[in-house]
Image (tube, rainbow, N blue to C red):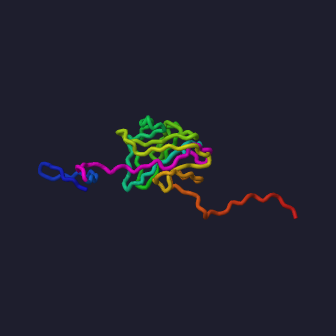
Amino acid sequence: HLVPMTAVDDVAWDLEPLLPTPGAANRLGAPPLLVFINEWMSSNAGLVLDPADGDPEDWFELYNAGSTPADLSAFTLTDVLTNATKFVIPNGTVIPPGGFLVVWADEETGQTTPEALHVNFKLSGAGEALGLFAPDGAPVDGLSFGVQDPSESQGRFPDGGDEPFVLMRLPTPGKANALASANQPPVLAGIGAKSV
């Protein structure tokens, strides 16, 4: 939407989007972010390796369910919901619409790139919490999870969906979450030595 603003001999236009406010006073602003903590693995036994150093690190994924890019500059991430400012997301971190951002929970912040964050905390295989907060401290998304098997991740299915969270035997960091379907090829046990 274009909002006219007064100018000396001309009309200037502000390209700031309008936020619909039915029944309330009009105001400028962007629609709320639709970013979710979408998938996480807190007991990575080598199923997924961190491309920065090849180590099997804890990780989680953010998913932008919105139709516009989500600029997460100065937003914060935490594994302690009472400490919202544990890790500040670097300026310029943007998730495209329908896109994903992998966050490595490895305490190796020097490995952060625009494609993958490395936060200053690790995840507990015994279970804990994860939170995403706006720069003003308002919660964007938060969750708690329990014990996790080293061979699986946990998350939302479909992407951005509500609880209950599901266990996934096929971790998909940076991609759409997937569940094993009934239509899978059979897995046969090896046949030992036989004699006739």
Magenta part, dominant SS: loop
Report the label total.
0
> Quadrant of the image for the N terminus?
bottom left
Question: Residue at left 53%, top 47%?
Answer: 40
- 68 or 11: nearer the viewer: 68
x and y percentages locating residue 76 in the rendered image: 41, 40
The part of the image, by quadrant, that contains residue 146 is top right
Relative to 189, say whether 104 is above or below: above
What residue is drawn where x is 23% and y is 49%? Answer: 25
Where's residue 87, x and y in %? 44, 37
Q: Quadrant of the image for the C terminus?
A: bottom right
In front of the other: 32 or 119: 32
Q: Quarter-wise, where is residue 194 in the image?
A: bottom right
Provide the residue span drawn in magenta: 23-49
Q: Residue furthest left?
A: 9
| Residue 29 percent coordinates (x, y) | 28, 48
In the image, is 146 to the left or to the right of 139? Answer: right
